[in-house]
Image (cartoon, rainbow, N blue to C red):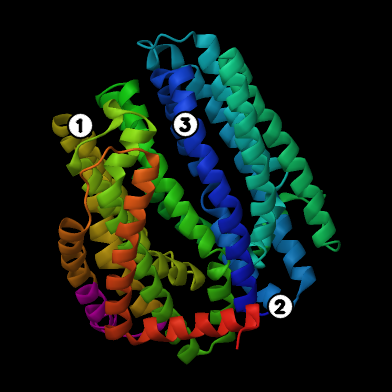
Amino acid sequence: MSRVSKSLKNAKVGVFFFTISIFIQFFSRKIFLDELGDDFIGLESTLRSILGFLNLAELGIGTAIGFTLYKPLYTNNQKEINKIIALLGVLYKKIGTSILAVGIIISLFFPWIFSDTKFSLFLIYFVFYALMISTLLAYFVNYHASLFGADQKGYIIQKYFQSFHIVRVLLQVIIVLYYKNFYLYIILELIFSIIYSVLLRRKISQTYPWLMIHYNGKSSVIKEYPEIIKKVKQVFFHKMSDFVKSGTDNLLIYGLINLQSVALFGNYFLVFSKLNSLIMMAFAGTGSAVGNLIAEDDKDNVNKVFWELVSIQFFIAGFFSLAIYYTMDELILLWLGEKYVLSKIILILFISNFFMMQITATINRFKNAYGLYSDIWAAISEAAINLIVSFTLGSFYGISGIVAGTVSSLFIIGILWKPYYLFKHGFEKSVLIYWKGLTSILISFVLSCLFVDFCINHFISREYDMNFLNWVIYSFKVSLFIIFIYGALLYIFNKSFRIFWTRIKILLKTTFKLN
């Protein structure tokens, strides 16, 4: 199967399952908030954030291992793959043990951390340890799954994970509606995590019968791969920065405001995180495809693929950013109620963060494929900027100030620094080529914003009773304007976007046997 075919299969399977998952998640969120309460959902989100902090101990091992696997997979060096996965197992078991130990220590402080909550300490401990056990399964049971991602077979993981996720959430909805029991709600998550891990491990054995599933070797295998250990240490700082950007907001909101605000923030965060994950599913396999492409050392092809991905990522970023701006308030109002609608400035900040994450995705994809992690100072600076700005502005402006910290750090490091670093050390070209190439795309987006706003304000009526059907119709009209205006301008002004759509048309004709 070709690299493009694998990427398309990953995308199709990922988007299919994830779309179903999104609808179920939105449906269930309303029920969980109504039946379990804002405070419990806020508590669960806060505990997940604490576990996210503990996962920093993972040190980016999975990312570094994935980078190292590209070449042996390309050459089908099974012996080398076994050794690398064995190394992953040794490292993950050490990290899993560390997470368990630190988690126990942190939990000793829960009586002080959650002294103002209405929930019993037993419930807090029960939720925390159930979630922690679910997390540790990835370290002790199914760490081999990293091979699926590096081998462009991430769709296998998605089939298993999303199927289990969908069934689990539906059962949790039933439990909550009939029993309103916090303990049963969490127990289901733990049970499904265990079953998922066992079945995924069995699937790994079936897919790679030559892979050593049970490795009893010693830690000396670590000494055989000093380059991987070096990459791991570098990736750690980038992982830390990623956590600070996305994982500390709940903790800051709880510390500076309250648990209820964590739930309010979580509703918007859910929308944007799920949308971001959906897009990642659409691009599933492209990271490993880029890694394999770079392993072939065809610089002209690398350059062509880079600009095609940049153009389509900009289109996706612009389309969803504009669509969300015009439809989000009504969605929250219909979905959860008026009290959950946050201010327009918070929405704009969320959109800004989402837009920048999308347009920097291609940069990150190529940066990771080249194994460029040595800019440790950039990761530390990004985390520091985020924390300082979020804490300072959050103390005065609440949620909007905290989100502003994330936006500012992403702009300074993600938008300004990372392209320079990739072009200098990866492509070995001037970054001015990048900014010059973006000129036509940025012009297309700015013009689209103006034209779309004019068309929506003059040609789409909003003077009717808002219900889900009317919202869907309104959103469909908004989406059509954005697609036609933004898509047409990009097609006219950007060559890479035209090449991309030509490629898509050829693939569609081949797939559906169209004349």
**Picture disc at residue 1:** 2
Q: Position of residue 174 (x, y in %)?
A: 62, 23
Q: Mark 1 or 3, which is nearer the eye?
A: 3
Amino acid carrying label 1: it is Gly
Crowd rating for badge 3 (residues with CA inside 10 Å; few <14, some 14–19, many 20+): some
Picture quarter with the N terminus? bottom right
Q: Position of residue 8 (x, y in %)?
A: 60, 70
Q: Main secondary structure of the magenta part?
A: helix
Q: Quadrant of residue 458?
A: bottom left
Q: Establish if 395 lies above or below 142.
A: above
**Residue at 60% over, 89% down:** 515
The Cα atoms of the two marked residues, 1 and 3, are separated by 23 Å
Of residue 81 and residue 408, the one placed in the foreground of this image is: 408
Q: Earlier in the sequence, mark 2 or mark 1?
A: 2
Q: Earlier in the sequence, mark 3 or mark 2?
A: 2
**Picture disc at residue 398:** 1
Q: Establish if 79 lies above or below 140.
A: below
Name the residue carrying label 3: 29
